[in-house]
Every structure is written in C-alpha cells, then in structure tokens.
Amino acid sequence: MISAEDIIERLKKSFHTPSRKDEKLKVVVLCIVISTTFWFFSALNKEDYISQVNYPVEIVFDETGYIATTELPNRIPLEVTGGGWDLMTRSFGFNMNPIRIRLNRPDESNFVLTSTLRSRLTPELDPVVVNYVLKDSLVFDIQKRVSREFELTLDTTSISFDSDFRMASQVLLEPRTITWTGPEKIINSLDRLIYVKADLSEIDEDVDEALDIPEPPALITTEVESTQLSFEVVRLMDVQTELNVRMVNFPDSLWSVNPTIINARYRIEELKFDVTDTTAIDVYADYDELDPLDSSIVLQTTLNNAFIEGLELSVTKVKASKNE
C-alpha cells in the first residue's frame, strides 16, 4: 500500500516534470485536498474539545384532552466536552435518541426545569461529557381542550330591502347554535354571540339562503360551517284617503271647524290593509287646544291600526268658528 509520504513525494516530482499549466493547477488542488483531509482526520482524533450541541426532546401529553397553543420546544442546548469523532456524530444528530418528557397535567405548569433532565442526558451522550445545560427551562403553553356552544345571529347591517318591501316575520337561523372546540383560555375569551353576514340587498321576496358561518380563530375547530337563513318579506302599499275631522270638547253644536275633511297619506303592509276599515285613523280637533289668537287648533291623530306608518296630513291645523 502506498503511504501518504510516497504520495507527497510523487506530487513534488510532478512539479519538475514538464506539463501544461492546467495539469499543474490540478496537482496543486489535489495537494490542498489531501493536506486538508490529513488535518481533518488528525484533528478528529484529538480529545477534550468543548462544543455546543442541541439534544432532541419530545414533549408527550394526552392530545385528546389537551392542545398546545404554541410550538413545543424540541431541543435542549448543551455545552459538552469530548473527542472530535464523538462530537461530530452528535453535531449531526447521530446516536442521540430524543428524551421523552411526559406531562400528565400540562395545563398546571407551563415549563419544565432542564436541571431535572440532566441525569437522563448524561448516559445518552456518553462518552461525551455534559458541562452545562445552557437553558434553565423548557417553556410551553398547553391548555385543556374544551367545547362551548355559541349562538348565531344575523348581522342586520348586511341586508337591505327594496324601498317598497320590508321584513314581515322573525329571522330564523338553522342551526341557531354551533359548538366550537379548542384551548380553554381562547374559547372562554370569545363572545358567545357570532354575527353572520348575509350580503343581500334590494330584497323584494321571501329569503331562504345558506350563509357561511365566520371562520373560528386559530386552533378552534367546528363541525358546522353554514347556517340556513329564512324570513318572510311583505310589500308596503302607499295609501291616499280622505278623513273626516272629529270635533272634541266643543261647548255646543254651534261651533264648526274648517276644513272638515282632509287628505291623508300613509304606508301599510299589503296584507294588513283593509279598504273597508274607516276607523284605522282618527283625526280630531280638541277645543281645549284652541289658540285664541287666531282660533286655530292643531290636529291630533290616533292610529287604530298598528301597521300604519309614515302618516302625512294635507293640513295640520283647522280654524274653529261659532255660528251665531
């Protein structure tokens, strides 16, 4: 077998042998590679190197009952002393089986002291010696996995009606409630009312639409992603009519008001309008409200139909006079 010294001697002689420039360059490169390799292997044979390694750990807990809200630590930084070969293998992760840290009640504490792990690390790294554990604790956040019920409600700002239509029934959402599951602290911090957007405009007919439920926050899971929205819609009618002015508290029958008939305009739901109902609106002039300066009386109204809205009268005052 050719020794390293023989190889070097041959390389030296090659410099005195006539050759092209690129061949000499190759010889130089080869010399550098060989010398570097000799140095590398020689260095690895030395003992008592001080280095730093990250030893793998695995935090184990009941993942059906608990949930980690942050990334779990998976390495412990160590300062170690050992031979070059041993340290190199550890630096590449060889011969380092993860230490399993089992947590029975992980929500009761959010850290593990690394000093409690030293006795387990020492035999795993042998013959490398642990000088120091460079981190005093492994910090995590693991919470109980809980489920809570949340109520769905329609965001009324996300719907608008045609000017001649309005809602005529209660808003129904099916399902009305949903269950979210996730870390206890996050779940408990959430508002129990979830607003669902419909994004419906110019509504002019009954609504029966599937709506997406807002996505839950990170780490929260749900089995329901949509709800069915339904409600009835009714058309509003513009009504114009004539009304008789009723006289109230006048001293005797010699008194009269002018005008005695006025025009009125209002809106009402189509299904609530009864053309034969003459008592829906009561317009009256109360003598006790007579203004002595001009004998005028401000008209008052009583709505006997709760569905009437936007009432407008052609006049708001009448003149009272006594016929002699």
Image (spheres, grey):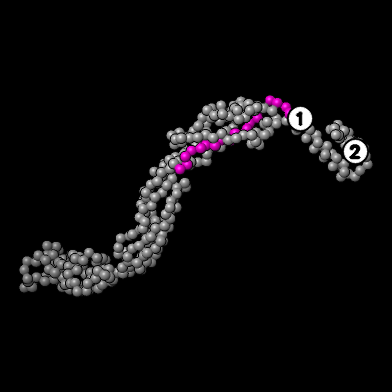
> Residue drawn at (60%, 35%), measured in percent from left and top?
97
**Frontmost residue, 265 versus 319:** 265
Which element is circle 1 on?
helix
**Frontmost residue, 285 versus 144:** 144
Residue 322, numbered label: none
Assign the N terminus to one quadrant of the image.
top right
**Frontmost residue, 129 versus 215:** 129
In the image, residue 176 lies at what x, y percent? 35, 55
Q: Inspect the magenta stretch and tell me whether residue 59 lies in it.
A: yes
> Would you name the residue on which mark 2 appears?
14
Magenta-drawn segment: 45-64
Residue type at the position of mark 1 = Ser
92 lies left or right of 301? right
Q: Earlier in the sequence, mark 1 or mark 2?
A: 2
Q: Are marks 1 and 2 in contact (CB under 8 Å)?
A: no
> Would you name the residue on which mark 1 appears?
42
